[in-house]
């Protein structure tokens, strides 16, 4: 679904992303893990065309359709191509209601009946949001706002969902609910690229993973295998093993 080749990103004199390459297959959840400052969020922003100075080849490959060169698209055209981003910090519209936020997720959909069907489906699956449908988004808890941000992205029926740190700052019970929503989206056929600092959680829910360190991918492979890798366990899981990730 997503093919990234030789992605570079520079801020002034700082090289944040140093020629990384990776893939996300159709219907697959892939994790991108790493420490703070590794370049994870920069990578997602580059893919979402929020940082147009990024260079490289980024291709969306919907099954049975022509490939789409995402690097040629401005950010506002990504939704039409089938790409949705849930940014770090949630980014809900605080002074609008839950219902209004969700409808904004489908702003490009002209068929109002289809929008209504998607809305009803999501609210049935997310009773907490349904209960708060007329409540201002800014008055929700952090976990509820994260749930709303993901649900709003799903309203566009994305082919590829980009998730940036969905568990950040949330209580464990809300993290479980958020990741249930994410895995349900994957099971429905949405391809997902997950950036997550909670490496253990990311590796448990993903099929494959890439480890990003100082703007470079240093490890990649099956998530279950990486979860047992001494280098990953030492650097990201807080386990006392005599290993480190080499560059």
Image (spheres, grey):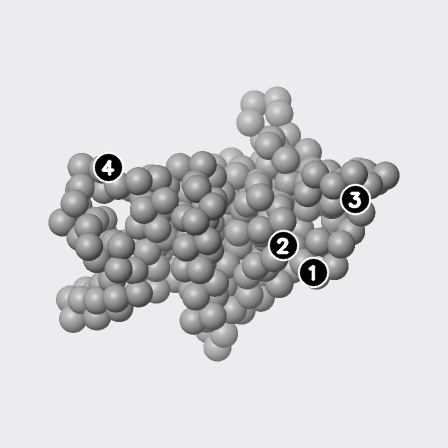
Q: Earlier in the sequence, mark 4 or mark 1?
A: 4
Q: Earlier in the sequence, mark 4 or mark 3?
A: 4
> Which is more toward the observer, 29 or 217?
29
Q: Is residue 160 above or below residue 16?
A: below
Secondary structure found at label 4: helix
Residue at image x 62%, y 25%?
A: 14
Question: Mark 1 to mark 3: distance in Å?
Answer: 14 Å
The residue identified by callout 4 is: 138
Question: Mark 4 to mark 3: distance in Å?
Answer: 40 Å
> Which is more toward the observer, 168 or 52?
168
Mark 3: few, some, or many residues within 10 Å (few <14, many ≥20)? some
Q: Is residue 128 visible?
A: yes
Residue 231 image label: 3
Residue 2 spot, x, y in % from top left: 55, 60
Secondary structure found at label 3: helix
Q: Residue furthest top?
A: 13
Q: Earlier in the sequence, mark 2 or mark 1?
A: 2
Q: Are marks 2 and 1 in contact (CB under 8 Å)?
A: yes
């Amino acid at each position: 679904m997503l093919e990234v080749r030789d992605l570079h990103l520079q801020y002034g004199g700082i090289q944040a992303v140093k020629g990384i390459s990776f893939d996300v297959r159709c219907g697959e959840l892939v994790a991108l893990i790493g420490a703070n400052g590794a370049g994870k969020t920069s990578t997602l922003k580059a893919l979402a065309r929020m940082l147009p100075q990024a260079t490289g080849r980024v291709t969306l490959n919907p099954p049975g359709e022509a490939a789409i060169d995402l690097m040629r698209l401005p950010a506002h055209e990504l939704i039409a191509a089938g790409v949705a981003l849930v940014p770090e910090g949630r980014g809900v519209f605080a002074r609008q209601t839950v219902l209004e936020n969700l409808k904004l997720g489908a702003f490009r959909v002209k068929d109002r009946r289809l929008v209504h069907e998607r809305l009803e489906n999501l609210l049935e699956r997310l009773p907490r949001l349904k209960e708060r449908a007329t409540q201002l988004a800014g008055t929700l808890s952090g976990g509820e706002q994260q749930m709303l941000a993901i649900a709003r992205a799903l309203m566009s029926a994305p082919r590829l969902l980009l998730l940036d740190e969905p568990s950040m700052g949330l209580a464990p019970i809300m993290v479980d609910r958020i990741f249930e929503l994410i895995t349900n989206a994957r099971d429905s056929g949405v391809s997902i690229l997950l950036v997550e600092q909670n490496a253990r959680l990311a590796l448990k829910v993903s099929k494959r993973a890439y480890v990003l360190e100082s703007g470079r991918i240093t490890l990649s492979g099956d998530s279950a295998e990486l979860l047992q890798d001494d280098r990953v366990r030492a650097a990201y899981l807080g386990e006392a093993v005599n290993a480190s990730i080499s560059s």
